[in-house]
Image (cartoon, grey):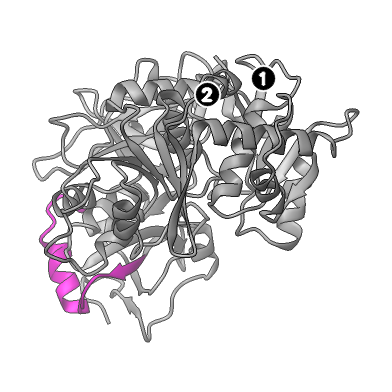
């Protein structure tokens, strides 16, 4: 099945499709209007494209009706939509445009709005995409280097759409709230695609922590998707007695922590389902009922933790009586799809990066993890997030999970800084929800039985914000590039051989 198939199935449907806010009011297009407008936009774009060049149209737009219409235009037409990151500027943006072979870059709403204002009927674009045809190029977040353009085929939209409809119980009666960046896979695959599958209405808006609940109420949203830290940001807004008085019943996404998942569900009266995946969509780990505290979830068949050196399955993780991981050196490996590439259709114009991902006929995610004896997977960070402290290997993510147990800590980013003699020292940057003194932090760490003495942060930075990608992922390389933090305002330093902070 293709995106075009799904759109054509809605061409005579007068139920609501696209909703957005304009001048303080909610506007709406039916599916019939949405498909007809997208056809006019596709025709206008086709006239501008040179048939001798790749038919790639870059879209540099915020969330809104224009971007939503460009998605449908690419689905109907013979061109490929390139989602350009709206936070990229200058040479970095130029490089993305060049890498993706964009013939045209749309950075204003006018083409879409012109198609919306024109009532003329136009023939559907003369295109016959297959499930394997290229629909879109979506850039990775770039947390571990330059963003890569992931090839997104039609079935990489229709497949997740169908899967999520079945898994989450979504129907045509739902209203999807899409506030994550629409140039990224989460918004397209977890927000737009399921609506396209069922014929549900979908509302588009830019994410705002304070605007989240008003949008949900105004749009009548019953379902929302997220990636990164949006749950944390919404929870940081002042709680009100009527927060649960809203139509939202289900929220789905990835990278939320356990405490925020529970708190968000309780405060807003909805179910939150978190899962692990990536833009490449080749390795999937799902949260399930009864999973151990701190676990990422249970992997789908074929997903394993392998040693990057030997390509063999690593031994099961072993824990001491306090819950500390005692065999990190041998148990931590890389999450791998051992059956092949999964839904990964490759990177565009980046053979070296593609070869790095596909080694030995398997997809290597670049994410570190370990697996307990019952098969539960625990996230250990990105492949570059190993710390070598006093001859012991430590992973960043388990330390972060422990730090987040403190109610005053809203976010924690653990990273390595050079030791003056050899190896690394543990540094962390914290965003606080409430006041926390160095002495209280020391007492908290001392009470965490599963925290290794070598994992105690040597340097603590209390910050107002963390460097992030457009999809709210923390750029730890930016933190590390600042070097060893110096004691002073907002920085605590632990004694070299002690536990107290100054």
- Is 275 displayed left or right of 449 in the figure? right
Q: Earlier in the sequence, mark 1 or mark 2?
A: 2
In the rendered image, residue 292 lying in the magenta stretch gets the answer no
- Residue located 66% across and 47% down the image: 117
- Residue located 19% across and 71% down the image: 441
In the rendered image, which quarter contains the C terminus?
bottom left
Along the viewing direction, whichever of 183 and 428 lies nearer the viewer: 183
- Residue located 50% across and 37% down the image: 188
Query: Which residue carries the number 1 mark?
Result: 133
List x then y, in percent, for residue 445.
Answer: 17, 63
Residues at marks 1 and 2, CA–CA distance in whole angstroms:
25 Å
- Give residue 443's quadrant in the image: bottom left
In the rendered structure, are the residues bearing label 1 and label 2 in contact, judged by CB atoms less than 8 Å apart? no
Q: Is residue 270 above or below residue 31?
A: below
In the rendered image, residue 439 lying in the magenta stretch gets the answer yes
Along the viewing direction, whichever of 19 and 98 lies nearer the viewer: 19
**Viewer can see residue 136:** no
List x then y, in percent, for residue 372.
Answer: 23, 28
- Is 58 displayed left or right of 264 in the figure? right
Along the viewing direction, whichever of 129 and 482 lies nearer the viewer: 129
Q: Is residue 308 above or below residue 205?
A: above
- Is 60 displayed left or right of 15 in the figure? right
Task: Report helix, strand or loop for mark 1.
Answer: loop
Give the magenta-colored segment's residue range: 429-452
- Give residue 406's quadrant in the image: bottom left
Query: Which residue carries the number 2 mark?
Result: 12
In the current view of this chain or complex, which residue is farthest to the bottom? Answer: 489
Q: Residues within 10 Å of mark 1 (few under 14, many from 20)?
A: some
**Viewer can see residue 304:** yes
């Amino acid at each position: 099945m293709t995106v075009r198939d799904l759109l054509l199935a809605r061409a005579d449907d007068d139920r609501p499709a696209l909703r957005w806010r304009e001048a303080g009011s909610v506007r709406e297009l039916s599916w019939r209007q949405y498909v007809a407008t997208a056809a006019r936009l596709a025709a206008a774009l086709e006239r501008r494209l040179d048939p001798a060049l790749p038919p790639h149209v870059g879209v540099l737009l915020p969330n809104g009706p224009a971007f939503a219409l460009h998605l449908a235009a690419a689905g109907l037409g013979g061109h490929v939509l390139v989602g350009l990151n709206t936070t990229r500027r200058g040479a970095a943006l130029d490089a993305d445009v060049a890498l993706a072979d964009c013939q045209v870059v749309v950075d204003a709403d006018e083409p879409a709005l012109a198609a919306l204002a024109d009532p003329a009927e136009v023939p559907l674009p003369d295109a016959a995409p297959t499930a394997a045809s290229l629909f879109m190029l979506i850039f990775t977040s770039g947390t571990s280097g330059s963003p890569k353009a992931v090839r997104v085929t039609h079935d990489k939209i229709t497949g997740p759409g169908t899967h999520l409809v079945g898994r989450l119980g979504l129907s045509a009666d739902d209203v999807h709230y899409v506030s994550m960046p629409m140039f990224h896979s989460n918004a397209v695959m977890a927000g737009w695609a399921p609506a396209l599958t069922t014929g549900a209405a979908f509302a588009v808006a830019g994410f705002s922590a304070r605007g989240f609940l008003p949008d949900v109420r105004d749009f009548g949203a019953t379902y929302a998707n997220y990636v990164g830290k949006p749950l944390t940001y919404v929870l940081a807004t002042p709680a009100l007695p009527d927060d649960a008085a809203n139509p939202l019943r289900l929220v789905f996404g990835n990278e939320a922590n356990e405490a925020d998942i529970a708190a968000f569900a309780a405060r807003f009266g909805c179910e939150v389902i978190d899962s692990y995946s990536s833009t490449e969509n080749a390795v999937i780990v799902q949260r399930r009922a009864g999973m151990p505290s701190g676990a990422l979830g249970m992997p789908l068949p074929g997903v394993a933790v392998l040693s990057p050196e030997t390509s063999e399955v690593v031994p099961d993780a072993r824990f001491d009586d306090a819950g500390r991981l005692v065999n990190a050196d041998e148990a931590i490996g890389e999450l791998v799809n051992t059956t092949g590439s999964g839904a990964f259709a490759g990177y565009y114009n980046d053979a070296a990066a593609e070869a790095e991902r596909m080694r030995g006929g398997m997809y290597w995610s670049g994410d570190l993890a370990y697996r307990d004896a019952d098969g539960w997977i625990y996230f250990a960070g990105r492949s570059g997030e190993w710390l070598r402290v006093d001859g012991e290997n430590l992973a960043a993510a388990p330390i972060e999970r422990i730090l987040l147990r403190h109610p005053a800590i809203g976010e924690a980013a653990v990273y390595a800084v050079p030791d003056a003699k050899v190896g690394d020292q543990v540094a962390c940057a914290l965003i606080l929800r409430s006041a926390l003194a160095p002495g209280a932090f020391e007492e908290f760490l001392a009470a965490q039985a599963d925290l290794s003495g070598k994992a105690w942060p040597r340097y603590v930075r209390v910050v107002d914000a963390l460097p992030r990608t457009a999809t709210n992922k923390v750029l730890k390389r930016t933190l590390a590039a600042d070097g060893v933090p110096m004691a002073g305002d907002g920085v605590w330093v632990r004694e070299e051989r002690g536990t107290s902070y100054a």
